């Protein structure tokens, strides 16, 4: 049996056995990936190009879009390539990179969602202190802390996982390199280090979850006390998208890792992994843009300006060609 010194690649779980279904899965995931690129790319462009969106809430949303792009790009392109070329292999180094970037981006995203809950808490419960508590420097520091926490957590898990010896084969029952699946291949007693790292991560996740829940308890209490119905509607319109994103992120992750073993099966585990690793990055732009009129307006303005810029370039090219044609005829 192979050990850590002889394992040069891992074999991922195929989405289907027949070639037709593999190509169907490729087309489906290509559509999801392009939708995620388009949605998150539009949010990045809209926030970067419109000065009215240069606020703490949209600054954090820009970071969220970047993390979503990175997260879905870590797992889906390799799965699509394997489905297209009928190949299940991923190199040892590729698996290490996938584990590192996936943990890095997911941890940073969860930390950022916690910061965004704090942003909504200050905006609604302490509006007079909003500019002082969430100035540009404070926002940059909080975003850097979110990215930094993701990096440290990724280093911890990647180092502890791939320091193990693997003697139970190299076939992973998942479409990407997922740590619980990798640990099943280990025959080393050093897996206790990874268990310790998981305990640290769970503690951080639980702490962030408690902070988000307490923040929203205060937010809902403050919103329900507002005398104006318009004020309540505006407050809910900025909070509900974030709450929906957090709920989707947490519920799919909890179900993936804490579901009872009695209902576990390869097909169910594959579907749940797709839900928590692919669905949130693709759906988050839609959730944030549905009730946010400012973001909708910025996106439509972006399309409008792009259309007229292309139209103007087209007119300039036609004029240039007509001028050259007249010059040549004369």
Image (tube, rainbow, N blue to C red):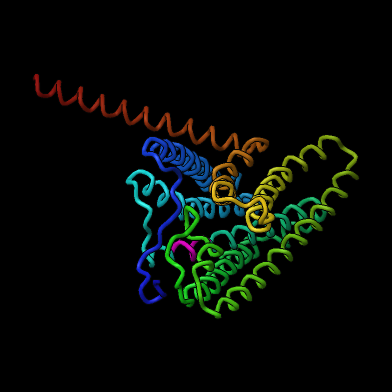
Residue 173 x %, y %: 50, 56
Q: Residue at x 82, y 53 (%)?
A: 125
Q: Is residue 115 visible?
A: yes
Classify the position of the C terminus by image quarter: top left
Which stretch is magenta?
97-102
Say left or right for 199 vs 275. Answer: right
Can the viewer see residue 104 in this picture?
no
Q: Is residue 252 left or right of residue 229?
A: left
Q: Residue at x 55, y 71 (%)?
A: 157
Q: Position of residue 251 (x, y in %)?
A: 69, 50
Q: Main secondary structure of the magenta part?
A: helix
The correct choice, above or below, for 163 with respect to 283 in the image is below
The percent position of residue 73, horizontal first and vertical second, equals 45, 52
Quadrant showing the N terminus: bottom left
Q: Is residue 82 left or right of residue 163?
A: left
- Seen at 79% across and 56% down, the residue is 213
- Residue 263 image offset from top left, x and y in percent: 66, 50
């Amino acid at each position: 049996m192979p050990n850590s010194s002889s394992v040069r690649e891992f074999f991922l779980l195929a989405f289907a056995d027949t070639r037709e279904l593999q190509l169907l899965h490729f087309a489906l995931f290509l559509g999801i990936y392009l939708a995620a690129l388009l949605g998150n790319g539009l949010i990045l462009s809209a926030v970067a190009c419109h000065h009215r969106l240069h606020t703490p809430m949209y600054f954090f949303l820009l970071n969220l879009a970047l993390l979503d792009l990175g997260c879905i790009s870590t797992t889906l392109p390799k799965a699509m390539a394997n489905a297209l070329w009928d190949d299940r292999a991923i190199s040892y180094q590729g698996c290490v990179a996938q584990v590192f970037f996936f943990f890095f981006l997911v941890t940073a995203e969860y930390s950022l969602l916690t910061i965004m809950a704090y942003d909504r808490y200050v905006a609604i419960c302490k509006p007079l202190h909003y500019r002082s508590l969430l100035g540009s420097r404070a926002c940059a520091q909080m975003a850097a802390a979110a990215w930094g926490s993701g990096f440290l957590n990724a280093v911890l898990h990647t180092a502890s996982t791939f320091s193990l010896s693997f003697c139970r084969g190299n076939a992973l029952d998942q479409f990407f390199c997922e740590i619980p699946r990798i640990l099943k291949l280990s025959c080393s007693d050093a897996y206790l280090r990874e268990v310790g790292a998981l305990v640290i991560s769970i503690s951080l996740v639980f702490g962030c979850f408690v902070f988000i829940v307490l923040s929203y308890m205060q937010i809902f209490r403050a919103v329900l006390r507002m005398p104006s119905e318009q004020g309540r509607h505006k407050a809910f319109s900025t909070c509900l998208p974030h709450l929906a994103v957090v709920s989707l992120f947490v519920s799919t992750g909890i179900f993936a890792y804490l579901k009872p073993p009695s209902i576990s099966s390869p097909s169910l585990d594959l579907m749940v992994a797709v839900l928590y690793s692919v669905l949130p990055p693709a759906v988050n732009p839609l959730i944030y843009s549905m009730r946010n009129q400012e973001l909708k307006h910025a996106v439509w303005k972006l399309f409008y300006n792009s259309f007229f810029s292309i139209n103007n370039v087209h007119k300039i090219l036609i004029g240039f060609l007509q001028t050259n044609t007249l010059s040549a005829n004369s």
